[in-house]
Each structure stands twice: as structure tokens, then as C-alpha cells.
Image (spheres, rainbow, N blue to C red):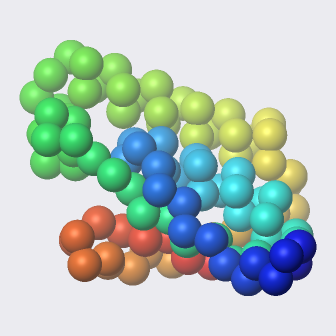
Amino acid sequence: MKNGIKSVILVSPGFRSRRSFLVHQAVLGEAGITVGCVPVFSEAANPQTWARTWHGLQTVGEQFAKLQYYRFYILPFSSTVEPIGQRAATGHDIWLN
């Protein structure tokens, strides 16, 4: 733990948050730093409305493909990162390990 940092909260665009969490957890977790993630969604692109537009479908599909790429080709196969979803006060998931 450099400079006494024990935990960080990652604020990330909503549909990119799982991938961001996994990458940051893989790097910072090795240093003993706990990582939490708070996804941020816009009114136009959120879990309730993304499927209503072509751009929403494209964004979610792209982020899903990138997540799988990172899981299988970037992060090590022996990674033990398994997030546990918890609800923040905003009603969005916070991913903690």
C-alpha cells in the first residue's frame, strides 16, 4: 500500500464499469488495495432505456465484446476476481471484491 491507500472508489461510465472494475481490481488488488466501483449512467443511456435506440444497442454490444476480450485475453486466467453486487444509495450496483 503506497502512501497508506487502503481502498479506492472507481467512478466509471455505466456500461464500461464492469470492465473498469476488473482491470483496476487486478492491478490494485495485488497491492492490497480494495476497489469499489460506482457506475454512472446518463438519462439517455441507462439500464432501463438502452435497448430503445440503435446507439444503445451498439454501446451495450460493444462493451460486452470488450468485457469478454479483457476476461479472456488481458486478465490472467487464474484471476480470482468475482464481484459481489451491492446497491448504492443511487440504486446502482457497487462492485466490491
Image location of residue 83, percent across then percent down: 57, 71
Q: Quadrant of residue 4?
A: bottom right
User: Residue, x 25% and y 78% (percent of image)?
Assistant: 89
30 relative to 36 in the view: left or right = right
Task: Classify 1 as above or below 18.
Answer: below
Q: Is residue 78 visible?
A: yes
10 relative to 81 in the view: left or right = left
Image location of residue 10, percent across then percent down: 54, 60
Q: Is residue 32 visible?
A: no
User: Residue, x 85% and y 76% (percent of image)?
Assistant: 3
Q: Quadrant of residue 43?
A: top left
| Image label count | 0
Image quadrant in which the N terminus is located: bottom right
User: Residue, x 14% and y 48% (percent of image)?
Assistant: 48
Image location of residue 20, percent across then percent down: 59, 49
Q: Nearer the viewer, residue 28 or 84?
A: 28
27 relative to 45 in the view: left or right = right
53 relative to 78 in the view: left or right = left
Task: Classify 56 as above or below 31.
Answer: above
Image location of residue 80, percent across then percent down: 77, 71
Task: Classify 52 as above or below 29.
Answer: above
Task: Classify 67 as above or below 97.
Answer: above
User: Residue, x 27% and y 25% (percent of image)?
Assistant: 57
- Which residue reaches farthest front? 3
Image quadrant in which the C terminus is located: bottom right
